[in-house]
Image: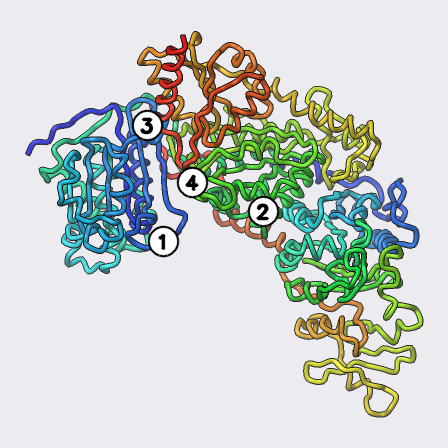
Amino acid sequence: MKNLLDEAISRPHIGTLEYQPKDFKPDVDVRWCAGCGGFSILSPVQRMMPDLGIPKEKIAFISGIGCSGRFPYYMDVYGFHGIHGRAIAIASGLKISRPDLSVWVATGDGDNMSIGGNHFIHGCRRNVDLNVIMFNNEVYSLTKGQYSPTSHKGQITKSSPLGALDEPFNPAALALGSGATFVARGFDKDRAHLQHLFKRAAEHKGFAFVEVYVNCNIFNDGAFDSFAKKDVREDKTVMLEHGKPLIFGKEKDKGVKLDGFKPTVVSLTDGSHSVADLLVHDEKDSTLAFILGNMTYNPEVPRPLGIFQSLERPSYDDSVQFQIDHEIETKGAGSISELLKGKESWEVK
Amino acid sequence: MEKEIVYLDEITVRFAGDSGDGMQLAGKQFSNASASSGVDVNTFPDFPSEIRAPEGTLYGVSAFQIKLGSNSVNTHGDMIDVLVAMNASSLKVNIGNLKAGGMIIASTKGFDARNLKLAKYDSNPLEDGSLSKFNLIPLDIESIVKEELKGSGIHPKIVRKSKNFFALGLTYWLFNRPMEPTVKWLNTKFKSKADVLEANIRVLTAGWNYALKNDAFKNQYNFQPASFEKGTYRNISGNHAVALGLVVASKKANIPLFLGTYPITPATDILQYISGYKKYGIRHLQAEDEIAGITSAIGASYGGSLAATTTSGPGLSLKIEALGLAVITELPLVIINVQRGGPSTGLPTKPEQSDLYQAMYGRHGEAPLPVIAAASAADCFDMTIEASRLALKYMTPVILLTDGYIAQGTEPWKIPTMDELPDLAPKFCDDPKNFAPYKRDPKTLARMWAVPGMQGMEHRIGGLEKQDITGVVNQDPDNHQKMVELRQEKIDRITNDIPKLEVMGNPEAELLVIGWGSSYGAIKSAVDEKLKEGTKVAFVHLKHMNPFPSNLGEIVEKYDTILVPEMNMGQLKNILQARFIKPMIGLNKVQGQPFKTSDIKFKIDEILSQKEVVQ
């Protein structure tokens, strides 16, 4: 017998699933600053959604606080704007209780790395089937410009006039170290790549974490220019593609080679090295993922972008369902009257 | 020697020993056997917050107190009639509560030089005559047990550990309670451990036979059966009752149950019970912290489950920001706070009622929500159903307050049938054309509920203030005023949906006692006893703390003198005084121990004698 919730959520979808990106745009103004990097996430998400073939009513976006927190209002699906840092915890409760949904989290570097850090690491290790997009602008923007857990050491902000003293988190490495099964990184200037990453995240069964470098043109403008600006981008970043060697540079003239565990840059033109010497990316290799993750703040190597790791492991929500099904299968569905009676009841006649 | 059977109305027994002596287990068995054989019981486990405190120490004493009787038993008993003391420390910390002439069954092995020193006794109280006003029965339990199991080949460690069953067997004979329930329990529990099973059953029986044959036990005591209503009963603790209440509430609501929570004393049992209910289709998350406990529950509630979180005081403090989120998103949520002594880590295993302010007011912003409180262990079941009813009907978080006393204490519970319980089915909106997230039921003011998965009603909610009806983010001054008032009005209206208070006792009384929560038993007994003595006293007990029952004002109006006993510094009293502008008298016990009946009686006498002087 179906319960009321099952009844309410299992009505057949009426109409087409052939959505257009515009079907995901609600009739509200997007209230981000003009020129905000956030638009570069919103648009590829809306473009990617039709490809998933999931009914709109089965999609939910959950957020915390910060500029990223407004994201659910800008998607015409179910949305929940939570409180600071707790989006992953809210989303976990939703997904565990509602495995039929596609659950997304929009969060930021302050929301997710600082106040929500605990939920993030536990979300990673628990492997709840969530798709987490983290807007990393390396600053607190909604509170108007304080340094964040991903701000670089020495960064001048309103709350660090003499320079931030903390070492930054490396979000991708933190996710890997916490056991996330899918870890990827993109940046706001490359929307097509982001669209690809979001789709892969959606297809991944388990905790999928996508870190996106997002420019805050008001409080931290140009934070990623040193490697993301058009004229240096190809020389300062390397794209991770499964099964392919790590080649980069405007002229595709450089590569990354492993020297023991140490990634080093080699020239492909001076005759010393060939493509065959280069590190070949394998998203199923978690040891390699750690090495690649650690390249992030290493000035001697290009900044890695793409999918660091994509591992298959049972998701938490599936495991919960499995335990329930297994219990019912082996012991039979529980009888409430037996539960209430317990083993030591007695009759008063 | 022929033993005389003496009939008693009631008696209080306390098993006390080291944390590792199995006193909790003996106590539980004794109370189950007693209850199932027709007497009323009320129990109170009293143990240290250390798991295995150093042996023999005063602070390591673990005790389990049971009161049994032919009449309705409301408390675990003020003074002890029979004390089982497994060592010197357990005698020392409990002797003050033993009645003159009371029986002490002492295990002499626990009174050796080492134990005496740890208990800070200069001489052995079993030998120095200091216990002459009691009926002292020293027994070398350890040797008797050893002798009983001699040649059985059972490991000495198991032999030593079985001594609590000897004490249990003695008390079974002493109070003529059946051993069968314990034998049955042992058979299930140690099915695969034949040696432990054999040792415990033999030692239990040896205890019975020892008392039967030994002249130190002159009388056997018995009780007329208590008058229980017809039905099926079991002994239940408050925490267990909450767990069952949640399961039943979800069945009556016909939606799934989700528990998001974090272990904390003394609420952890609820999580443990629920985690074993997978075959009932129940989901839970043992979260990374208290905050994730409640926020995951909010997520599940958003998804259409009956969602709950369980905690104790410090945990509730951590959850409070999220409570505001549940208030503004108007989602059903049940929060169970098993109160303990505070502030901070305070007295983790000891009860207190000091979270009332926190439950009523501990939020930022105007965030009203219903607060209810359970009166006894069995009442925890009914109050969990009530919390779920209010949450689902009014689309609101509800706080249920229990405490360490009733959460861990037990009493017989008449098991309800499903038909007796209210229908809690929520109404999911099924008309997309008519849907708006903050459209309200005109009577209850509950907002419409549509959950992800329902086509055509995709909407966004969250912590930002929303426009009335549409739910669009809105900062308009008049709209905020309206939404704040609507949320308040919704909670206020609940007063018409809860039972009116009944005044117990003498309606023409000179003194009204107002109680709440777990102090019900002690107050009820005190008032009953005073009424029997001819004192004009009346009593009301609050279970709905916010909003109050609609006739509370009338009742308060009627009495000149009002006493409010509570295990805090006067939280309810202050709330009532502010609400009804009327001075009241507090009786405030903050010792990590529940009220005794005598505490309340003493205060009633004191107030009434002062009144006479004034008149």
Decide: few, some or many residues near mark 2? Use Cα within 10 Å; few <14, some 14-19, many ≥20: many
- Tell me which numbered mark, 2 or 3, is placed earlier along the sequence: 3
Do the residues at pointers 2 and 3 share their chain? yes
Instruction: Return the mark for residue B52.
Output: 1
- Tell me which numbered mark, 1 or 4, is placed earlier along the sequence: 1
Give amino acid for label 2.
Answer: Glu
Give amino acid for label 4.
Answer: Lys
Mark 3 to mark 1 CA distance (whole Å): 31 Å
Instruction: Return the mark for residue B350.
Output: 4
- Tell me which numbered mark, 4 or 3, is placed earlier along the sequence: 3
Give amino acid for label 3.
Answer: Asp
| Left or right: B595, with B8 as reference point | right
In front of the other: label 2 or label 3?
Answer: 2
In terms of secondary structure, where does tag 4 sit?
loop
Q: Residue at x 71, y 55 (%)?
A: A112
- Tell me which numbered mark, 4 or 2, is placed earlier along the sequence: 2
Mark 2 to mark 3 CA distance (whole Å): 37 Å
Query: Measured along the vertical axis of the image, is residue B175 above or below residue A66?
Result: above
In front of the other: label 3 or label 1?
Answer: 1
Query: Measured along the vertical axis of the image, is residue A284 above or below residue A5?
Result: below
In terms of secondary structure, where does tag 2 sit?
helix
Q: Which residue is mark 2?
A: B290
In terms of secondary structure, where does tag 1 sit?
loop
Decide: few, some or many residues near mark 4? Use Cα within 10 Å; few <14, some 14-19, many ≥20: many
